Amino acid sequence: MSVEINPLFSVGYVDTKKPGVFLELMAEDIKERVINEEGLYIIGLTSEEYAAGALVFERIHDYLEIVSLYVLPEFRHKGGSRLLLAALEAIASKLDYIVTARFSMVDGETELLEEAFENADFQKREDVDYKTYIVTLADCEDAESLKKVKKNPKIKYFSELTDNKLKSYNKQAEEKFAPLPIDGLTSETVDRELSAVYEENGRIKGYVVIENISYKNGIRVAAAYNGSDNPLILMWLLKAAISAAENKYDANIPLVIDVVDDNADRFVRYILPEVTEVSRIFDKVPDMV
């Protein structure tokens, strides 16, 4: 496979131990992963002496997965993204690997990503378990299924609990291998006024953790867990979280929800039928050399 040539740009590997200005072309979570040396690789795009873009990827089994692709606005629509992708495809072809990318369509930047992958002949993957949905608080308020759910007195908001109690719940969750936010239940990103837990005799039976996100000042379900046979627990928790959000935020702010299997997918679409899927996964099998 031949690497494309564009006289406006050049591409090359960037030393992850000394990424320099290329680090500024990445989201904060990706920067942190690069700084912590978490097995990422960087291809840099330059125009003369300027850093114009960066592609960050990692090696997972027989995939090269793109975790970040960004080109500065003044250099867009000039073939830079295509050049970065072609460079990665050349690497993948030598390894006999597939190139893949997953992201959510939650702002204008990711809409540009979808266009870039389509222009580079990547194929959108349709049948996937992991999905991301988005819905407004106004749509949540109108959801008939949630209107039927009554408040449960055993539900408590994180704001009612001490840090020690939350740490105890966090330890229980880890023992159960339950999903947790990256920095746990006491993370600074967790909105304690919205996040809620259901417990019996000091043992957690379920929780919903809500985080604040930068997209339109919205919120996100960072983790949800039901450790009992009672399917109503998650409905009680979600009802509590959304009710608190409706009292705190504007009705038009978005709620982002990630689902990781078919059961969670069916649950979300039943509870909130107005959700819109915004997740995307693109793949490409490069020509073999």
Image (cartoon, rainbow, N blue to C red):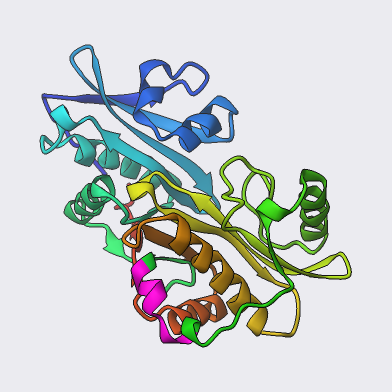
* Magenta part, dominant SS: helix
Can residue 136 be seen by looking at this rendering? no
| Residue extending farthest right | 201
Q: Residue 228: where, in percent of width, then height? A: 76, 79
Give me the residue at 48% from left, 16% from top.
18
The residue that appears at 39% across and 32% down in the rendered structure is 26
Q: Splitting the image into 4 quarters, where does residue 68 fall?
A: top left
Residue 226 percent across, percent down from the top left:
69, 73
- Image quarter (top left, top right, bottom left or bottom right) of the N terminus: top left
In the image, the segment drawn in magenta is 138-145
> Whole-percent x and y of residue 27?
41, 35
Residue 258, compared with residue 211, is above or below; it is below
Quadrant in the picture for residue 132: bottom left
Residue sitting at 14 percent across and 28 percent down?
74
Residue 135 is situated, as x and y percent measured from the top left of the image, at 36, 67
| Residue 231 vertical placement versus 170 (above, below) | below
Residue 203 magenta: no
Image quadrant in which you'd find residue 121: bottom left
What residue is at 48 percent from the left and 67 percent from the top?
A: 130
Tell me if residue 11 can be seen.
yes
